Amino acid sequence: MKILKMNRITKILTVVVTCLVIGYFSGMVTRSAIITWYPTLVKPSFNPPNWIFAPVWSTLYIMMGIAAGLVWDRIESNTEIVKKALVFFAVQLALNALWSYLFFGLKNPMLALLEIVILWLMIYETYVQFGKINKIAGYLFIPYLLWVSFAMVLNASIWWLNK
C-alpha cells in the first residue's frame, strides 16, 4: 500500500484553509454581537473601525497557515521538534477561536482578557519554536504577535472602561 506523500504547497494550502475555516467559524460567533452588544460598549479612542478586523484577521490566518505549512514540511528531517512546534500551533489556534467565544459569545471581556494573555504566550512560544525550524515561518508570526499584543491592550481597555 502506497502512502500519499504531500508536497510543501499541499501542506501549506491545507493549513491555510484550516486556519481560514477556524477564523470563519470564530467570526460567526462575533457577527451578531458586533451589531447588538459591541456598539453598546465604551471603547478607547484607539479602537479601530469594525471593517478593519476581517481583512487583518484573514491576512494573519493566511500567514500563520503558511508558517505552519513550512514547519510541517520539515517533519521528516526533524520529527520531534516539528511535532512539538505544531502542538503549540494547534493550541494557539484553538485559543484564538476560544477568545472570540469568550469576548463576543459570552460577552465577557474580563474572561477574554485572562485568556488572551495565555493566547499571547502560546503565540510567542509558537514563534520561538517555528523560528528554530524555519526562519521565515518564525518571521511570519511577528505580525500576528504584534496584532494580538494590540488586541490585548484593546481588550483590557474595553474591560476597564465597562466594568
Image: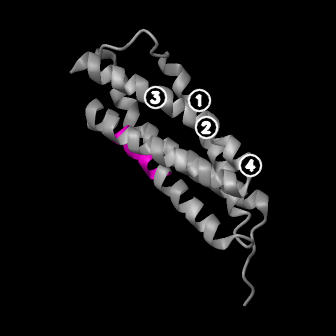
* Secondary structure category for the residue under label 2: helix
Q: Which residues are magenta?
A: 93-101
> Which one is nearer the viewer's eye here, 146 or 90?
146
Q: Main secondary structure of the magenta part?
A: helix
CB contact under 8 Å: marks 1 and 2: yes
Residue 151 tag number: 3
| Marks 1 and 3, how far apart at CA | 12 Å
User: In the image, residue 26 lies at what x, y percent?
Assistant: 44, 42
Residue designated by label 2: 60
Query: From the viewer's perspective, is 92 left or right of 31?
Result: right
Query: In the picture, which quadrant includes the C terminus?
Result: top left
Query: From the viewer's perspective, is 24 left or right of 127?
Result: left
Identified at 33% across, 16% down, the residue is 39
CB contact under 8 Å: marks 1 and 4: no
CB contact under 8 Å: marks 2 and 4: no
User: In the image, residue 70 lies at what x, y percent?
Assistant: 72, 56
> Disc 2 residue type?
Leu
| Marks 2 and 4, how far apart at CA | 17 Å
Crowd rating for badge 4 (residues with CA inside 10 Å; few <14, some 14–19, many 20+): some
| Marks 3 and 2, how far apart at CA | 13 Å
Regarding residue 57, the answer to whether it shows in the image is no
Q: Is residue 83 above or below residue 92?
A: below
Query: From the viewer's perspective, is 64 left or right of 124?
Result: right
Query: From the viewer's perspective, is 104 left or right of 163?
Result: right
| Marks 4 and 3, how far apart at CA | 25 Å
